[in-house]
Amino acid sequence: MSELFEVTSIKALELKNRSIRSATWSGVADKKGRITDTAIELYGNLAAGGVGLIITGFQYVMPNSVAMPYQAGNYSEDLLEGLSRWVQAIHARGAKVMAQLVHTGSKANPELFWKKEAIWGPSSIPDPLTGRTPKEMTHHEISQVVEAFAGAASRSKRAGFDGIQLHGAHGYGINQFLSGAANRRTDGYGGSISNRYRFLGEILEAVRGAVGQEYPVFIKLSGHDYFEGGLVPEDSLYVARRLVDDGIDCIEVSAGSRASQNGMVPSRTKIGKGEDEAYLGTLAKCFKESLDIPIITVGGIRSPSVIARIFSQGIADYVALCRPLIREPHLIDRWKNGNFEKAACISCNGCFETALDGFGVTCKVDRDAKERQC
Ligand SMILES: Cc1cc2nc3c(=O)[nH]c(=O)nc-3n(C[C@H](O)[C@H](O)[C@H](O)COP(=O)(O)O)c2cc1C
Ligand code: SF4
């Protein structure tokens, strides 16, 4: 366990340990994406629990890319004050925080738009999850998205975030452009993997232009879409190498989307035994062995012994956890204080439901148990 508690740095970002809270949509904003007091409270408690770096839930960079109820927004200067308050609450309790930025592409939910907008995607084909058909983005619209990412990155830096993470996984906009299943374009943004990378390459260039070379810019990247005609590891490694050449600082290797086949979704269930844990470790190791930047592995990490193996076998430099920290926001401190019991989370995914009411994501198992006691 000692490696978990090593102090490390990525550029000027010093991290007190190697644990990261993977981005988690937490249902803590209002209907226009403004941060609420619930966010301050929920994230403040999480920050006090020992995790080294918190990556926020995905923040939408344009009004036509809200996908989930009470999702945080980062599309306008009006949101800056709330974002700053959020950061301050986390810093005050000793954790670092990065903003995850997303354009959700064809997964945007028009029922959550507050003005009439079209859904945009790389190609005009039905989204495999929502069934909705987006408008194929024109070159002008692509530039608008690129500028929106740059604007959100600049705003995040000014709000005090310690860096940003681009959401390039789970079937959202960037992933859609990279994936042959969603991107059927015949112009310079479609076809070969080099062309499909162009959209992401332009976003990274614009973001760097907005925040400078020294500001940490990470990406959560899909290593495999687990979907017919989608991204495969060979393509994803090509993308990762291009990202490194273009100045990305760290890659969190995820995979799948809620439309993936055979249960290969990002948040998998049935993690019983140790061998079920760290289900994306093999994929992460391919990235770790091929690239000379820090790699984060995420997905089903539950036990100190598995974390020790991740470091000793050179699978990744950092471990990211989502659901275990919903159930036990102070899990990292528990381990630090010598209680090495595995995380109490049973990976049932009930917590997705709990964030729908706008009062913040919580563990459904615990919520149900409390209700039974009342
Ligand atoms: C309630 C919930 C919300 C999530 N929101 C996001 C998100 O905003 N961005 C993201 O990249 N992944 C999101 N995820 C996926 C997690 O970050 C993570 O990749 C996945 O759950 C696997 O990690 P775990 O086994 O530690 O939960 C979410 C997962 C859950 C359960
Ligand atoms: S509802 Fe609770 S136990 Fe189930 S996955 Fe979410 S945090 Fe874990």
Image (cartoon, rainbow, N blue to C red):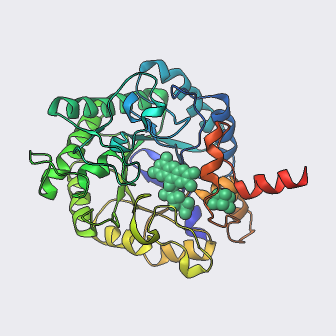
Q: Is residue 15 above or below residue 137?
A: below
Q: How many marks?
A: 0
Residue 115 shown left or right of residue 96 in the figure: left
Along the line of sight, which residue is nearer the eye, 136 or 295? 136
Picture quarter with the N terminus: bottom right
Residue 209 appears in the figure? no
The answer to which image quadrant residue 269 occupies is bottom right
* Residue at 75%, 68% in the rendered image: 339
Along the line of sight, which residue is nearer the eye, 253 or 11? 253
Farthest residue in the left direction?
Answer: 187
For ligand 2, which image quadrant applies? bottom right
Farthest residue in the right direction?
Answer: 374
Residue 137 appears in the figure? yes
Q: Is residue 11 above or below residue 160?
A: below
* Residue at 44%, 58% in the rendered image: 258
- Point out residue 77 in the picture as x, y percentages from the top left corner: 43, 19
Q: Is residue 168 above or below residue 337?
A: above
- Point out residue 237 in the picture as x, y percentages from the top left corner: 25, 64
Residue 48 shown left or right of residue 240 in the figure: right
- Point out residue 29 in the picture as x, y percentages from the top left corner: 57, 31
Residue 98 shown left or right of residue 172 in the figure: right
